[in-house]
Amino acid sequence: MSNQLETERARAAQWFRDLRDQIVAAFETLEDTHSQGPMAKAVPGRFEVSQTKRHSDDGSDAGGGLMSVMRGGRVFEKVGVNVSTVFGSLNPRAQKAMAARGVPGIDSDPRFWASGISLVAHMQNPHAPAVHMNTRMFWTPGAWWFGGGSDLNPCLEYPEDTAHFHATQKAHLDPHGPTLYPELKAWADEYFFVPHRGRARGVGGIFMDDRNTGDWEADFALTQDIGRAFLPAYVPLVEKRRGQNWSDADKDAQLVHRGLYAEYNLVYDRGTKFGLETGHDANAVLMSLPPLAKWI
C-alpha cells in the first residue's frame, strides 16, 4: 500500500456516495408511504440536489460534492444528506489545530484530502426523533484515519426506540470485536455532551475519530458497517412515530430541543468547525441547523 492511498481513497469516496444514494431513496420512500395521521394528506417531500464547489486561494479546484436537502415534507420538516470530497492545503489556523492533535508531519506539509457523508434530519412530528449520522476518511502525507458515527436526538423520548437504535448499532459493530460497541458508545456519550447546558444533546449512539489501527481494510470495513447500521436503526422508528398525533406542548418541546441541537453544532461540532475553516460551502456546512427553533 503506497503512502498516497489513491485507490483506497477512491473506494472510500465511492462508498460514501453509494450510502448517500441509499439514504436519499429510503427517506423519499418514508415520504411516499406516509398514509395515516398528521400531514398524511400533504404532498410528499423530495430532495433538492445541488453541487457544491470549493476553490483554493489561487482559484484552482479544491473539490466539492452534492448537497441534498428536503424542506417541508410531510415526514421530514428539514433533512440534509451531503457528500463531499475536498483537497488542497490547510490554512495556517487549521494546520496548527491538526498539529496540536498530533498529526505527524502536518506542521511542515499542510496538504490534505477528506471525503465523507453527513446527515441531519429534523422531523415534522415531535414524536419522531431527530437524528445525525456522519462517516468520513481523512488523509495527509503523514497520516490517515476514519471517523464518524450516529446519534439519536428525540425531544420526546421513548425508551423502546432508544433501545432499538442502540441494539441495531451493537449488532453491526459486534463482528468487529466485543469491546468496540461499548467503547464507541462511551465516546458518543462524551462527544455529544453539551457542557454549558450540563446535559447530553440526545440519547447517544456511537462515535469514533482518528481511527487508524494500521489495517486500512479493517478500519474501512468498520466505517462501512457504521453506515450500514443507520437505516435499520432509524427507519423503523420513523415508521412507528410519524402517524402519532401531537399537541402544542409537544411541538413546543421539539422547538426548545432544537435550540440545544443548534447550540451544540455551532459551538462544539468538529465537522462544522473544519468545514468553515477550510472554505467549504457554508450552506452545506450549516445544513444541520433546524428550520425553526426556540429558546426560553
Image: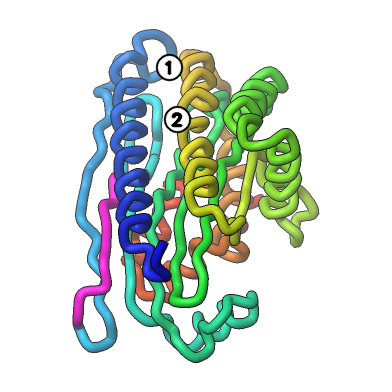
Q: Position of residue 2 (x, y in %)?
A: 39, 67
Which residue in the structure is indicated by mark 1?
Answer: 38
Q: Residue 265 — which label? A: none
Query: What type is the residue that disc 1 sits on?
Result: Pro
Q: Nearer the viewer, residue 243 or 190?
A: 190
State the image quarter where residue 267 is shown.
bottom right
User: Does the magenta stretch mainly form a helix, a strand or a loop?
Assistant: strand
- Residue 66 falls within the magenta-colored stretch: yes
Tell whether 39 sits left or right of 155: left
- The residue nearer to you, when weighing 194 against 248, is 194
Q: Residues within 10 Å of mark 1 (few under 14, many from 20)?
A: some
Q: Residue at x 51, y 83 (%)?
A: 106
Q: Which amino acid, mark 2?
A: Gln
- The answer to whether residue 181 is above or below residue 125 is below
Element carrying mark 2: loop
Give the quadrant of the N terminus: bottom left
Q: Are marks 1 and 2 in contact (CB under 8 Å)?
A: yes
